[in-house]
Amino acid sequence: MLARIEGLEDLSLTTNGYLLERDADALAEAGIRRMNVSIDSLQRDRFFEMTRRDALPQVLRGLEAVGRRPELGPVKVNAVAMRGFTEREALPFAEFARENDFHVRFIEYMPLDADHGWTPDQVLTGDELRAIIHAVHPLEECPREPSATARNFRFAEPPRPGRSRRGTIGFINPVSEPFCSDCNRIRLTADGRLRTCLFSLHETDLRAPLRGGAADDELEQIIRDAVWRKELKHQVGEKGFRRPARSMSAIGG
């Protein structure tokens, strides 16, 4: 079991939530300690429009199942922010966060779509979304942890009578407010390649040396060399930006 690996400090899962109703208990017992669930709309027809699956009730039941397992918290609900779509979702998601112990995070739309249809004018910025929510539910910014990707906010207003739980709202703004200067993240793809940035044009193959019997110190040096070459910034929105060949679904969330 992964959770029993010596030295492992955290084990989380990013999911579309389709099978959480069935698997929440098993995931908790397997040692998962954090959960990220991707939901771009809380309206059934618009959820179907985005995902091509009529599965919103199923996903929400899955979140309820996760909520019954406190060891799986904090649960983060991630929504991609797209202009012309997410403006209508901002307040429903804010209410969803207030009513539940979930942390809703809006992620600016990035050029990692499989259709390669991204354009800068499709990006709905975190500041715009925050203004929509703040006008109805005043927000107070939480202290930022070092290397955190999100700017997190708590609700300034008290919980509704009879309710003690309140979630938070977060904004991940890689396009309008890059956080490259203190980014400490790297990713390992399902096919064994190390990426030092979501927008990397180069990958480091770890599968071949692993299968070739490389010793731990050799693998450590390969990883150190890759991290040493980590990009200074992603250059999204700048002249000469080149998008990676892999989409987000091929990189891994």
Image (cartoon, rainbow, N blue to C red):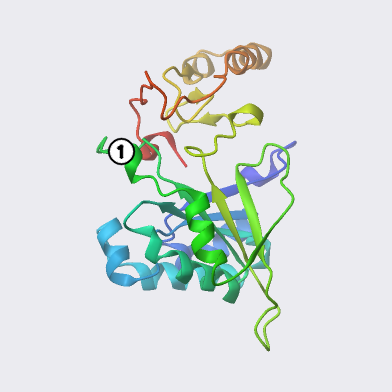
List the residue tagged with mark 1.
118
> Please, is residue 217 above or below residue 128 in the view?
above
**What element does badge 1 sit on?**
loop
Residue 251 position within the rendered picture, expressed as x and y whole percent measured from the top left? 42, 34
Which residue is drawn at the image coordinates 33% and 25% (left, top)? 245
Query: For the point 55% across and 14% down, which residue is it?
Result: 213
Q: Is residue 226 above or below residue 102?
A: above
Relative image position of residue 187 (x, y in whole percent): 53, 31
Is residue 206 found left or right of 237 in the rendered image?
Answer: right
- Which quarter of the rendering shows the N terminus? top right
In this figure, what is the number of numbered marks?
Answer: 1
Left/right placement of residue 156 relative to residue 35 reads right
Residue 152 visible, this angle: yes
Residue 58, placed above or below residue 249: below
Q: Nearer the viewer, residue 56 or 22?
A: 56
Residue 163 x, y percent position in the rendering: 67, 83
Residue 237 falls in image quadrant: top left
